Image (tube, grey):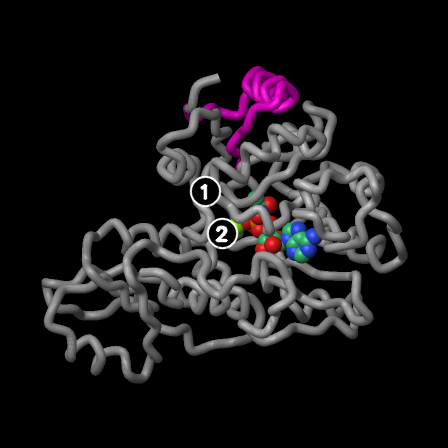
Amino acid sequence: MTKRILQPTDENIERCARHVIAGGLVGIPTETVYGLAANAADDAAVASIYSAKSRPSSNPLIVHVAKTEQAEPFVADWNDDCRLLAEAFWPGPLTLVLDRSPQVSDLVTAGHKTVAVRSPAHDVARRLIERADRALVAPSANQSGQVSATDARHVISEFPLEDFPVLDGGACALGIESTVLDLTGETPLVLRPGAVTVRALRNVLPDVEVPVIGEQTNAPGTALRHYAPRTPTVLVESQRFDERLDELDEGVAVISIGPRRLGSQHVLVEMPKDPDDYARCLYAGLREADESDRGLIVVEIPPWSGGLWRAINDRLQRACVPPLNP
Ligand code: TXA
Ligand code: MG
């Protein structure tokens, strides 16, 4: 199948299901971000995901399922905590990290003793998994470390050299990745803040803990630089924002909350104040700023921290760490 955007008709879902069963990759919409899906039980297909994304082999993949029973064979013990969390948040943007069962491929888990599972809420992702009748691994559909895709066209632009179909599910409703919760330690630990807030998790498991960014040294996939535009990006506090822009000689791309009067040399990407709306526009905003061909992106730090802002600020901070080998 050639690379192109397909409307999610029953016929196209059927074609894509046959394509993944045969070992191919398919770009899929989820409620969080677009994913690049392959059959979790096919090592050659899983290996091709790592190479298409230039993903380090040490960074494991999430197994996506349509229903809880499909997740159970992948995990050693589907215990009461999993059951409660799945009942509360599945289908939806919560990924559970659990002890793996022996049947999971080492390629999926990157050799770890744990496996990540999630049941996406997006109708198109669910129809594909159901039609294929098997679990699919699906990392975010972007080059490793780069900005995630929230639109089918973004997926095509991230993989200029690859040839796979992308199912078009429109713009992602949430726009920010799933929350990754590790249930394998003594206390449940948020490895990646995401669309399910810490408060919502604590309503189900009161002892959920959240480490500070940069201190999750033993968790895979928590490299400081991630979700990053190609253009150097800096964060500036709201209070100092205008003052900092005045100091700049060259035109820059400005990501500001709400409108802002700027010199004509600058490009403005205006973000909404509401956290749900901000999250939905976050990656498209970073892409727009990146494509404006300015030498620098200057982002106003959202002056709020609760709820979804935790995940938004996590992504912004990781987008702004300079590359190790610039
Ligand atoms: O919202 C999402 O989760 C999206 C959509 C497509 O479902 N997927 C996604 O996948 O964000 P990816 O591969 O870009 O990020 C998965 C994160 C990585 O940080 C990875 O290290 C972590 O989940 N992860 C996967 N398996 C793990 C494991 N066994 N232990 C700890 N972390 C794991
Ligand atoms: Mg990702």
Res 71 quadrant in image: top right
- Three-letter code for the amino acid on which mark 1 is drawn: Ala
Residue 260 showing in the rendered view: yes
Res 37 quadrant in image: top right
Q: What stretch is highlighted in magenta?
A: 4-29
Residue at the location (54% across, 29% down)? 26
Res 106 quadrant in image: top right
Residue at the location (60% across, 69% down)? 217
Residue 64: percent from left, percent from top: 68, 40
Residue 95 showing in the rendered view: no
Residue 165: percent from left, percent from top: 48, 25
Q: In this view, does 6 lie above or below 189?
A: above
- Which sits in the foreground, 3 or 13? 3
Residue at the location (62% across, 28% down)? 44
- Which sits in the foreground, 90 or 253? 253
Q: Is mark 1 on a helix, strand or loop?
A: loop
Residue at the location (19% across, 53% down)? 293
> Relative to 312, is 38 on the left or the right?
right
Residue 151 within the magenta-colored segment of the rendering? no
- Three-letter code for the amino acid on which mark 2 is drawn: Gly
> Relative to 82, is 24 on the left or the right?
left
The residue identified by callout 2 is 175
> Relative to 170, is 178 on the left or the right?
right
Residue 284: percent from left, percent from top: 37, 50
Identify the disc placed on residue 171.
Answer: 1
Q: Pointer 2: residues within 10 angstroms few (<14), some, or many (20+)?
A: many
Q: Pointer 1: residues within 10 angstroms few (<14), some, or many (20+)?
A: many
